[in-house]
Amino acid sequence: MRGQLFATLVVMLAACGGGGGEAKPDAAPDAFNSTCGKPGDTGNELGIGKFCASLSDCSSTTSAKLCSSIGDPTTHFCTKTCPMGSTDQCGTATMCVCNANNQCGCTPNSCLGN
């Protein structure tokens, strides 16, 4: 009986190897799959284009208090609404872009392929 118990214990310990291989690093918890807006983007003089992960990240901007991910979860930049057709509301290097529902927001030119 003792022999069987010892043999079982040895087999169990041998089966619990340490893995021996190098562990691959996990993806960073703050890694974003973003079609527009990357960590470190500072935005223009109004804050449009500043990287945001949530609405609170835009609270310190001059006038871009919305995070684009609210309307499109694949984008991460601070923005603000703008009237359709406006050309002077969004500041440097941005455009007022409207969707199919005529909802318009300031968008960095770098996101538009211009």
Image (tube, rainbow, N blue to C red):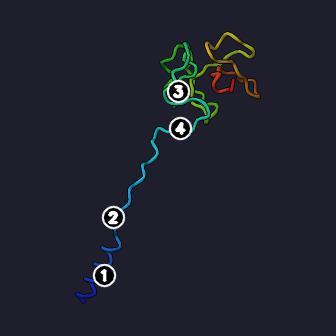
- The amino acid beneath tag 4 is Phe
- The amino acid beneath tag 3 is Phe
- The amino acid beneath tag 1 is Thr
Q: Secondary structure at mark 4?
A: loop
* Residue at far left of view: 2
Q: In the rendering, at what x and y percent does residue 102 appear?
A: 75, 23
Local packing at callout 3 (Cα closer than 10 Å; few below 14, some 14-19, many 20+) is many
Which quadrant of the figure has residue 7?
bottom left
Q: Which residue is mark 3?
A: 51
Q: Which residue is mark 2?
A: 18
* Sequence-earlier tag: 3 or 2: 2
Q: CA distance from mark 3 to mark 2?
A: 41 Å
- The amino acid beneath tag 2 is Gly
Tell me the tag on residue 19.
none
- Residue in the picture at 38% in, 56% down: 22
Is residue 13 found left or right of 36 in the rendered image? left
Q: CA distance from mark 4 to mark 1?
A: 48 Å
| Quadrant housing the N terminus | bottom left
Q: Secondary structure at mark 3?
A: loop
Q: CA distance from mark 1 to mark 2?
A: 19 Å
| Quadrant housing the C terminus | top right
Front one among 97 and 19: 19
Q: Examine the rendered structure and indicate whether residue 27 appears above or below residue 75.
A: below
Residue contact between numbered discs 3 and 4, judged by CB atoms under 8 Å: no
Is residue 88 found left or right of 15 in the rendered image? right
* Residue at far top of view: 88
